[in-house]
Amino acid sequence: MVSKAIREAIVRAFHEQHLQYAEIAQLLAVGQATVNRVLRLHRETGSVAPRPRGGGNFSPLRGEVLEQLRVLVKERPDATATELTDALIDRALVQTSPSSVKRALRRLNYSRKKRRSSPSSATRRSTASGGAHSARS
């Protein structure tokens, strides 16, 4: 980010000394694009102060909706993030995605498995140390 003093010097060099963008850039050791941006900002706002930063996208999963997600996790501890997303959309009438639900779960200090559990097998797994059924008796 360019300091306020450099921004002001860019404007003075252009308006008072009538220098070209390339000359200002070389004189103040900044890029020509910086000169262009600072002068455009000054032209549009009358100031060299930087514009406020953007606010970003806020998650709809907060407050009451976040509490409903917490309840869903308690009701369905084995549910995947996709299953929780579908249930939350039905219950809270909110538009969201599995990735948003995963981020909300991390904020709640929950972790999620990535796929459904498969049902247990009816037969037991055999082990290598079978003992009595060994070929060497």
Image (cartoon, rainbow, N blue to C red):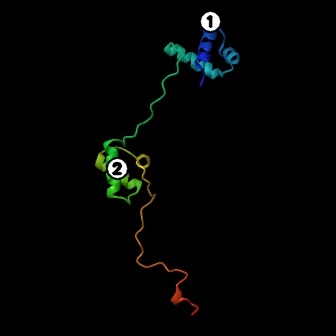
What residue is shown at x 43% (from left), y 50% (from top)? Answer: 109
Which of the two residues, 124 or 87, is positioned nearer the viewer here? 124
Numbered mark located on residue 57 in the image: none
Label 1, on which residue? 16
User: Alpha-carbon neighbours of circle 2 within 10 Å: few (<14), some, or many (≥20)?
Assistant: many
Location of residue 67 in the rendering, given as x and y in whole percent from the top left corner: 32, 47
Residue 40 is left or right of residue 19, and the answer is left
Measuring 64% from the left and 10% from the top, which residue is drawn there?
Answer: 13
10 in relation to 79, above or below? above
Q: Position of residue 29 (x, y in %)?
A: 69, 20
Find residue 20 and report its image quarter.
top right
Residue 27 position within the rendered picture, expressed as x and y whole percent measured from the top left: 70, 15
Q: Residue at x 47, y 29 (%)?
A: 54
Amino acid residing under circle 1: Glu
Q: CA distance from mark 2 to mark 1?
A: 61 Å
The total of numbered circles placed on residues is: 2
